[in-house]
């Protein structure tokens, strides 16, 4: 299986780096966080509690998720509708974090994620790719950065989209999400034993991409 697993906390640069590395390697990039976000969006649209397993589990059968590559980059389709922008709000992030703690949701996405990796060479990013989803991945990377640096990067992203955002609020959100993601009972965020730690706090995106490509070249 040609697969690169990149895990790590929010804002460590996973998506930017994984996307670029995938393009250069000719692999498919899979943003698994986007899948959790789309489920969170669907659940909240249906008026269900994103933290309630009994409410969420029966809705999963009505969800069809697709990742499609267009001229504008990768888009997330939820039941055929492009929700790529709507899943990027702070509220969507919070709902994603809640549904991500539910066993039914994780089982649902496990199948989808493994199916994609069976069909094509992938760079998949998330929280549990090296530990749970693709334990056989050839290369596993745990990508991280200091919380302050991650908040600064998120702030820049918001500003570039012309959105209002506050550094302190973003920093608190990041810390809260790190905590929720690493302490949940099922598939918590943690470094796989055979993953390479890549700290991007003092790296430019290009330096981090090169580090990933070098790891792939030497096979992990
Ligand atoms: O990477 P992100 O911010 O788009 O992820 C959204 C949420 O989904 C985040 O709270 C963690 C969760 N997630 C997860 O539990 N497992 C993954 N493989 C990917 C994301």
Image: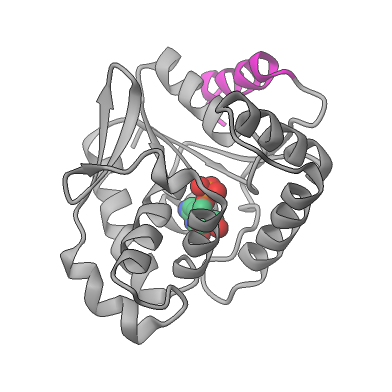
Image quadrant for the C terminus? top right
Please identify the dominant SS of the magenta region.
helix
Q: Is residue 128 visible?
A: no
Quarter of the rendering containing residue 72: top left
Look at the picture and state if 192 lies above or below 5: below
Numbered label tally: 0
Residue 218 is a magenta residue: yes
Query: In the image, residue 187 lies at what x, y percent?
Result: 52, 66
95 or 2: nearer the eye? 95
Q: Is residue 24 left or right of residue 187?
A: left
Image quadrant for the N terminus? top left
Query: In the image, residue 153 lies at what x, y percent?
Result: 71, 32
Query: In the image, residue 82 lies at what x, y percent?
Result: 26, 39
Q: Which span of residues is magenta-colored?
A: 204-220
Residue 154 is a magenta residue: no
Task: Look at 56% across and 19% down and name the residue there.
Answer: 213
Task: Look at 66% across and 64% down and name the residue there.
Answer: 182
Q: Is residue 183 visible?
A: yes
Quarter of the rendering containing residue 85: top left
Task: Look at 62% across and 34% down and name the residue there.
Answer: 158
Look at the picture and state if 5 lies above or below 182: above
Look at the picture and state if 95 lies above or below 122: below
């Amino acid at each position: 299986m040609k697969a690169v697993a990149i895990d790590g906390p929010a804002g460590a640069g996973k998506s930017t780096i994984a996307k670029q590395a995938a393009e250069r390697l000719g692999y498919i990039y899979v943003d698994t966080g986007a899948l959790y976000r789309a489920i969170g969006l669907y659940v909240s649209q249906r008026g269900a509690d994103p933290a309630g397993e009994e409410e969420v589990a029966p809705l999963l059968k009505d969800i069809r998720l697709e990742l499609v590559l267009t001229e504008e980059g990768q888009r997330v389709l939820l039941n055929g509708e492009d929700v790529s922008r709507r899943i990027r709000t702070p509220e969507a992030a919070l709902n994603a974090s809640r549904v991500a703690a539910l066993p039914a949701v994780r089982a649902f996405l496990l199948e989808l994620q493994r199916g994609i990796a069976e069909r094509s060479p992938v760079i998949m990013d998330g929280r549990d790719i090296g530990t749970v989803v693709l334990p056989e991945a050839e290369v596993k990377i745990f990508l991280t950065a200091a919380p302050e640096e991650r908040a600064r990067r998120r702030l820049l992203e918001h500003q570039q989209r012309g959105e209002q955002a506050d550094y302190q609020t973003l920093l608190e959100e990041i810390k809260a999400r790190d905590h929720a993601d690493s302490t949940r009972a099922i598939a918590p965020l943690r470094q796989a034993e055979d993953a390479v730690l890549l700290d991007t706090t003092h790296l430019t995106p290009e330096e981090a991409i090169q580090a990933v490509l070098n790891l792939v070249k030497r096979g992990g």
